[in-house]
Image: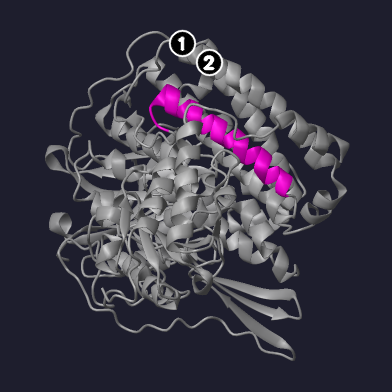
Amino acid sequence: MLEVLKRIARGGVLSEPLPTADEVRREQGRLQSSLLEVVGRALCIRHVDAGSCNGCELEIHALNNPYYNLEGAGIRFVASPRHADLLLVTGPVSVNMEEALRRTYDATPDPKLVVAVGDCGACGGVFGESYASLGSIAKVIPVDVTVPGCPPTPVAILQGILGATRKAPSRGRNP
Amino acid sequence: MAPASSAVKAVPLLANVRGRRLLAPEREQWSGMAESMKAGGAGLLALWGTDDRDRDGCFRIHAAYLLPDEVVLVEHALPAGSESYPGLGPLFPVAGRLQRSVADLLGLRAEGGDERGWLRHGGWPETFFPLRRDSPATARFARISAPYPFVAVSGDGVHEIPVGPVHAGTIEPGNFRFSVVGEKVLRLEERLGYTHKGVARRFEQLSQSEGQRLAARLSGDSAVAFSWAYCAALEAVTGVAVPPRAAALRALVLERERIANHLGDLGALGNDAGFAFGLAQFSRLKEDLLRANAQALGARYPFDFVVPGGVARDLPAGAPAALTTQLGALETAITELRRIYDDHPGLQDRFREAGRLERELAGTLGALGLAARASGLGRDLRVDQPWPPYDRLAPKLAVRTEGDVAARVQVRFDEVLESIRLCRLLLDGLPDGATGVEVPAAEPDRLGIGLIEGWRGPVLIALHAGPGGAIRRCHPHDPSCQNWPLLEFAILGNIVPDFPLINKSFNLSYSGQDG
């Protein structure tokens, strides 16, 4: 236990100034006020992998590391779409995931936001459209913001979430 | 005696590792080769089919077997008009899902064994086979209802827990059906294929020079391994030798990919056992590594760093020294955290005995990579069949015998420290010279194999060249195909709440297996 405490103490507050830390913190500050305006409380995100290569997932994971400290900005990932305000969707939509994506969207209470993450989510990426891939997320559910990149950086994903909270939520729109 | 024309014929194998390529004209030879491979201690590494009806009216089935010192490719042309071949399931359990995938994509049926669809979930009709050359690339289908018959477990107090395909965490989609009594798992059946994106068909629409971009995105966490395997296959068919500096830089990014994934897993494993400190610490170290990647390699995740003929860019001036310094700090931190993990009774209580996979079962199931090494099967391509630059690095094998979560944690610790040593060696002795050479179009009909030990295990690319720089067929294989079935056994007798921890200790790729 002593070793653990020593390590924590020596590590200090990890969101120390780094090359991009100021930018991130500024984004987080804006995000918090934007959240309060739009949602009136903390933001709950449900991630849905609709067929991604798992590259985008790696960067979504990074949002929870001490540098980006997403929970510090009042944003957390939840286990059920029924608890979520925002769906963070990755991948080209595989034909095998289309129904699960639609049902996850339907299970998310209105008003809801959708952020499509990555080049694949934006346009199908390198996988394109085929018998097995439907291409972009917007082909299946309404999308408020797309975040290009392969994979997009955590800062870009954070900015996408911020952008979505500033837009009017897509209240039960049909695709 | 059989006539000479129907004897098994050996042709040279074009690959980055040692190997043989055997053509088995008769179905008995296909089965006989499988038996002799099994008897010789080989594992079935990959299985794929090709539609060669435009050439000689035949479909072909190809098997890649992995031995400690070589890879053996066996191919069998089905008689014209035939669409079935002798199944390999009784010899190699891993063949089951691979054969179901071949049936879904190419319509070739393995005789004997499970005939349920694997990759086809009702998204396209049973009569459409995407890898047949007469199947139009533009074909789209309305969804058909295709219920999947899970194997039912009956008995007093047995109930089922269906999980997925959308999971509770930030992970990929898959379906798990637990049959449990109380909280103990009696049976787990996986249903995968949800992220099937049709990559094999997609490869055929790309040129040989474009294929690397798709290869890097077969499983994002193994982007470097798959890029390298693709490039190695292409370089093998074109006879291109990569300059020493490029080979060293490729190994550097491959080892950094290994370090990044192991750091992520070590943190997540601590977290899944209720030790959030571990996640905070390791995710910080991983972020440090990724930021250094951005500085030195141009991207946090250098998906497109390994390109045909070499690497996409050289390190900027000063980068080797900066990377070496950071690796030193990383090593100190990991050594300290390892001591904390090892000495933490609560953590070790969760890790030990959880999700145990005995050596014998791991061998029977054909376990690969780090999961195999944690169950006492000491195989690592970098050690067994080192390709440049590993031939001059002498990597050390990390192996444990317990086969539980604790062993898979220890293998990760050993490997991450060894990778740091290899990175230092590479940075220290970085050869001068070019970072790439031109790769010409391959001669049509050549087949090349690229086999690279990624962080999860060996990844394979089999590249059949077409005319004018086209890809005739490209088959990727992720070691997750071998290791997903291990999880079904490792969970037996454990409690449901330990599943996330046991699952994470394997950390398998859905996208890589689904294709």
Q: Is residue B49 placed above or below B320 in the rendered structure? A: below
Q: Residue at x 30, y 74 (%)?
A: B123
Residue on which disc 1 sits: B318
Q: Is residue A97 magenta?
A: no
Res B515 visible = no
Return the x and y of residue B124 as percentages of the image width and height: 27, 74
Q: Residues within 10 Å of mark 2 (few under 14, many from 20)?
A: few
Amino acid type at circle 2 is Ala
Give the dominant element type of the magenta stretch: helix, strand or loop: helix
Q: Residue at x 50, y 26 (%)?
A: B292
Q: CA distance from mark 1 to mark 2?
A: 6 Å
Q: Quadrant of the C terminus of chain B?
A: bottom left
Q: Quadrant of the N terminus of chain B?
A: bottom left
Chain assignment, label 1 = B
Residue type at numbered disc 1? Gly
Residue B18 placed where, x, y %?
Answer: 45, 33
In the image, are marks 1 and 2 on the same chain? yes
- Seen at 59% across and 21% down, the residue is B326
Task: Give left or right: position of A18 versus A93.
Answer: right
Magenta span of residues: B276-299
Instruction: Give the number of the disc on residue B322.
Output: 2
Q: Nearer the viewer, residue B111 or B206?
A: B206
Callout 2: SS: helix
> Label 2 near label 1: C-beta < 8 Å?
yes
